[in-house]
Amino acid sequence: NWNDGLFDKLRKASFDYYRDFVEEVGMDEMPVINSSAEVFDFCAPSNLIINVYDKNPDDTFVTIELNCEWEIEHGMQWTVKNDDELIFVGPYDGVSIGFAFEIEPNYARKYNPQLSK
């Protein structure tokens, strides 16, 4: 049960990823996204992975791969721990385990202070 607060963080972190990507590669043929409220209009889930590990069976990691209009080659990845903790937002790289927070760039860091430790 993902709550509105988590979706708000996902929107904001995804928009941060979009802005950095556009800044890096330029606006040629990029969609114009003016705010985090619009970002979900330009991406769609394509794959869902759910992981539970023997080390700590109380933790569940949900990873969603998304197709994005601004990053057609790699798309985007979200990883959420236990339905409420944002662990990773950034380019899709196939890492679906709880170590996704170690990957850079990770746009979830700004919205989850625990990741900075």
Image: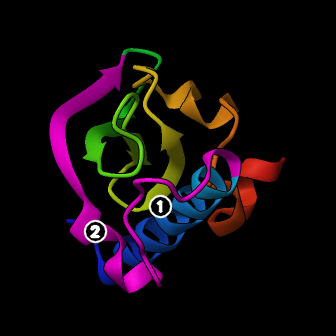
Question: Vertically, is 40 above or below 25?
Answer: below
Please report the residue visible at 46 percent of the width from the left and 83 percent of the height from the top: 34
Looking at the image, residue 64 sits to the left or right of residue 27; the answer is: left
Badge 1 element = helix
In front of the other: 89 or 56: 89
* Label 2 environment density (alpha carbons within 10 Å; few <14, some 14–19, many ≥20): some
Location of residue 29 by image quarter: bottom left
* Residue matched to label 1: 14
Say what amino acid the circle numbered 2 marks: Phe
Q: Are marks 1 and 2 in contact (CB under 8 Å)?
A: yes
In front of the other: 77 or 57: 77
Question: Vertically, is 95 above or below 42?
Answer: above
Counting residues from the N terminus, which is met first, the one under dot 1 or under dot 2?
1
In front of the other: 4 or 91: 91
Q: Residue furthest top?
A: 54
Q: Can the viewer see residue 93 in this picture?
A: yes
Location of residue 40 by image quarter: bottom left
Question: Vertically, is 19 above or below 35?
Answer: above
Location of residue 95 by image quarter: top left
Say what amino acid the circle numbered 1 marks: Ser
Q: Gap in Å between the C-alphas at discs 1 and 2?
A: 8 Å
Q: Residue furthest front?
A: 28
Please report the residue visible at 48 percent of the width from the left and 72 percent of the height from the top: 9
* Residue matched to label 2: 40
What span is colored magenta in the figure? 24-53
